[in-house]
Amino acid sequence: MNNTIDFIEAQTGKYQPEWGIILGTGLGQLANEISIDHVLEYADIPDFPVSTVESHKGRLIFGRLSGRKVVAMQGRFHYYEGYTMQQIVFPVRVMKALGIQRLIVSNASGGVNPDFEIGDLMIINDHINLLPNPLIGANDDSLGPRFPDMSQPYDRRMIAAAVEIAKRLEIPYRVGCYVGLSGPTLETPAEYRYIRIIGGDTVGMSTVPEIIAARHASIPCFAVSIITDLGVEGKIKEVSLADVVAAASAAEPKMTALIKELIQIFC
């Protein structure tokens, strides 16, 4: 990691972000709201993975959002791309080393709660991990403890603040549990039923590893899903990546407004 940090600090003048932001599928336009100071292509950063998904641009953006210094990942990494879990969470550890104090994660996901509709915004208050755990293997005590507590994976204060912001801005919102699977296939009807039975409200292929790594490093986390398709009996239909990206992009302005207000509240 030292080579990565040294390169980034040399390119950014030792920029010290307060917030880390990870932008999911179809959600990269939040970067347009950032007053940009530096942009680094993933491909240019030593030891950094490279996005292979069409809708993920693959840039690390440093700048200010709502008056706070941020570093934003415009594109993330997924297990289905063939990366190891350690590679997937490497950027979170890099952001921690750069100085972030809080992390925001976004994703596009399928809704399995029958009350949900396409375009809904769901504030994540818990998750179920059905992926390999990124902490498997030798533990680096400098990053965090061998057995990190996960009783509060998503920061309750930020969740409460986000709910109040959504009410004030009249943004329709949901609160619920995200289930992380490997992908890249979308789920079968039986899998959707299983996810709902075990307590899930949404399902996707990201977020959980990054949150685990962040909590391992004692970083408070906030995450939000945009519902881009439905895994509810009677509402399941064939879905393409283009459909997911279009639904996420259409709902993104609501997410952007929420995140901008949230960042302004917490220092």
Image (cartoon, rainbow, N blue to C red):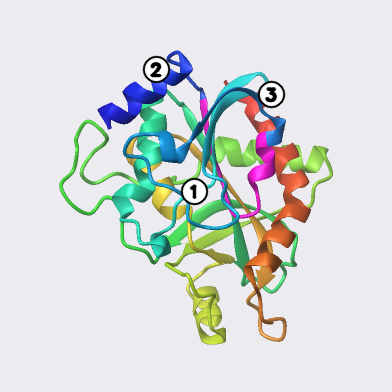
Comparing labels 2 and 3, the label whose residue is closer to the camera:
2
Q: Which residues are magenta?
A: 19-31
Residue 17 image point, x, y percent: 50, 22
Query: Which amino acid, by three-letter code, is at mark 1?
Result: Arg
Among numbered discs 2 and 3, the one appearing first in the sequence: 2
* Side (left or right) of 32 relative to 80: right
- Between residue 52 and residue 117, name the one nearer to us: 52
Q: Regarding mark 1 in the picture, which secondary structure is present there?
A: loop
Outermost residue to the left: 138
Image quadrant containing the N terminus: top left
Q: Earlier in the sequence, mark 1 or mark 3?
A: 3
Q: Residue at position x 23%, y 54% from top?
A: 136
**Mark 1 touching mark 3, by CB under 8 A?**
no
Q: Which residue does the numbered mark 2 point to in the structure image?
A: 10
Discs 1/3, front: 1
Residue 215 in sight in this render: no
Secondary structure, mark 2, is helix
Q: Which residue is mark 1?
A: 76
Question: Callout 3: few (<14), some (14-19), or many (20+) C-alpha neighbours within 10 Å?
Answer: some
Q: Say if residue 66 shows up in the picture.
A: yes
Q: Amino acid at mark 3?
A: Ser
In x, y percent, where is residue 160? 63, 40
Tag of residue 66: 3
Q: CA distance from mark 1 to mark 2?
A: 23 Å
